[in-house]
Image (cartoon, grey):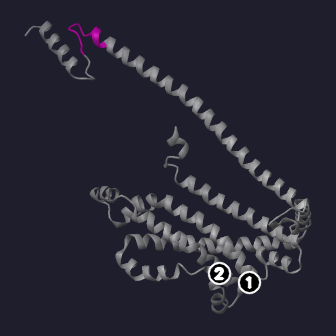
């Protein structure tokens, strides 16, 4: 076979195999391949520039949508406050007796007076300590129990019926038992808070673990991974969305129950102070307590949601899916 024939064979092979470079007899690049490479490079450059151009408006649109959402949320709160002031200041009675409620200005005056007192901040700090203590215990035990219920049949057979029997009982109904069970009111209130947050976290974690695709576990085991490898690499990361869903629900239920427990058996706390204001017919202070509870609950729920977003960055968001 001559040199020219060998070059022709190499050129034919390069045409039949994508990605192969055909070289002529003199060692230079075949003109057809050179033209193909330059065309491909031009297409890639054009696609890259197009993607960048499309991504820039998408980011600006996302930023604009975010600001619009924030403005709408603020306006909704302002409209609700304006409606509250309008209905109470004008003594409106539309089946509901708004004339018996304090106005916004009266409530703001009571809030300003309480801000300057040590008692207000002491009550606020006491309620936060109770919430954080009970919620932290509920998070640890709830996640651990949920994972065990989802992974172990024996544990589910032994502990599952007990949790299902106790779960429908309202945590506030356990207040008399907590008073008898614990030596101090403080420990009883923390226990009520723990119990309120525990069951949503446990149930959500259990369902998240049981819903994991079995192919994930099989992939780890085929690579030689054992039980702990499956737990660390599959179960815990895969169940994080469900875990944080349970945490978000649990912290809201915990606030409901801690305030109720403070009203029944507490000596400090926002709930206790709100009930005391009601007994002395100080309705502006009652609304100060209600607003304080709402703001604290919103802040703690937002903190849990923010932590969940940071821990599950790999999940596609609604805006990304829509795009």
Residue visible at 55% across and 25% down in the picture: 53
Residue visible at 38% across and 66% down in the picture: 228
The residue pinned by badge 1 equals 264
Q: Quadrant of residue 227?
A: bottom left
Q: Quadrant of residue 138?
A: bottom right
Q: Where residue 278 sits in the image (x, y, percent)?
A: 84, 77
Name the dominant secondary structure of the magenta segment.
loop
User: Callout 1 environment at 10 Å: few (<14), some (14 to 19), or many (20+)?
Assistant: some
As drawn, 175 above or below 198 = below
First along the sequence among labels 1 and 2: 2
70 displayed left or right of 207: right
Query: Magenta includes 189?
Result: no
How many dots with numbers?
Answer: 2
Magenta part of the chain: 22-33
Label 1 sits on a secondary structure element that is helix
Residue visible at 29% across and 8% down in the picture: 31
Label 2 sits on a secondary structure element that is helix
Q: Where residue 276 sits in the image (x, y, percent)?
A: 84, 79
As drawn, 65 above or below 180 = above
Marks 1 & 2, CB-CB < 8 Å contact: yes
Q: Which quarter of the figure is the N terminus placed in?
A: top left
Give the label on residue 172, or none.
Answer: 2
198 displayed left or right of 275: left
- Front residue (pair 191, 20): 191
Query: Magenta includes 27?
Result: yes
Q: CA distance from mark 1 to mark 2?
A: 9 Å
Q: Quadrant of residue 91?
A: bottom right
């Amino acid at each position: 076979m001559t040199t020219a024939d060998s070059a022709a064979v190499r050129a034919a092979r390069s045409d039949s195999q994508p990605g192969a470079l055909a070289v002529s007899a003199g060692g230079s690049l075949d003109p057809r391949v050179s033209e193909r490479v330059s065309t491909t490079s031009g297409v890639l450059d054009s696609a890259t520039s197009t993607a960048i151009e499309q991504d820039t408006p998408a980011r600006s649109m996302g930023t604009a949508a975010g600001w619009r959402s924030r403005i709408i949320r603020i306006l909704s709160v302002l409209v609700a406050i304006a409606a509250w002031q309008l209905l109470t200041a004008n003594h409106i009675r539309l089946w509901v007796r708004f004339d018996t409620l304090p106005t916004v200005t009266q409530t703001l005056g009571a809030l300003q007076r309480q801000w300057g007192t040590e008692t207000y901040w002491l009550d606020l700090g006491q309620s936060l300590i109770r919430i954080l203590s009970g919620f932290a215990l509920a998070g640890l035990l709830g996640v651990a129990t949920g994972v065990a219920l989802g992974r172990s049949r024996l544990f589910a057979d032994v502990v599952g019926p007990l949790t299902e029997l106790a779960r429908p009982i309202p945590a506030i109904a356990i207040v008399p038992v907590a008073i008898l069970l614990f030596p101090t009111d403080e420990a009883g209130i923390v226990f009520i808070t723990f119990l309120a947050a525990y069951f949503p976290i446990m149930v959500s974690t259990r369902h998240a673990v049981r819903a994991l695709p079995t192919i994930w576990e099989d992939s780890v085991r085929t690579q030689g991974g054992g039980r702990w490898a499956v737990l660390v690499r599959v179960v815990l990361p895969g169940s994080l969305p469900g875990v944080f869903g349970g945490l978000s629900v649990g912290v809201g239920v915990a606030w409901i129950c801690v305030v109720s427990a403070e009203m029944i058996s507490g000596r400090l706390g926002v709930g206790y102070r709100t009930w005391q204001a009601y007994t002395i017919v100080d309705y502006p202070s009652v609304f100060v307590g209600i607003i304080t509870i709402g703001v604290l609950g919103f802040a703690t729920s937002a903190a849990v949601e923010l932590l969940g977003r940071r821990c599950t960055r790999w999940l596609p968001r609604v805006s990304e899916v829509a795009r």
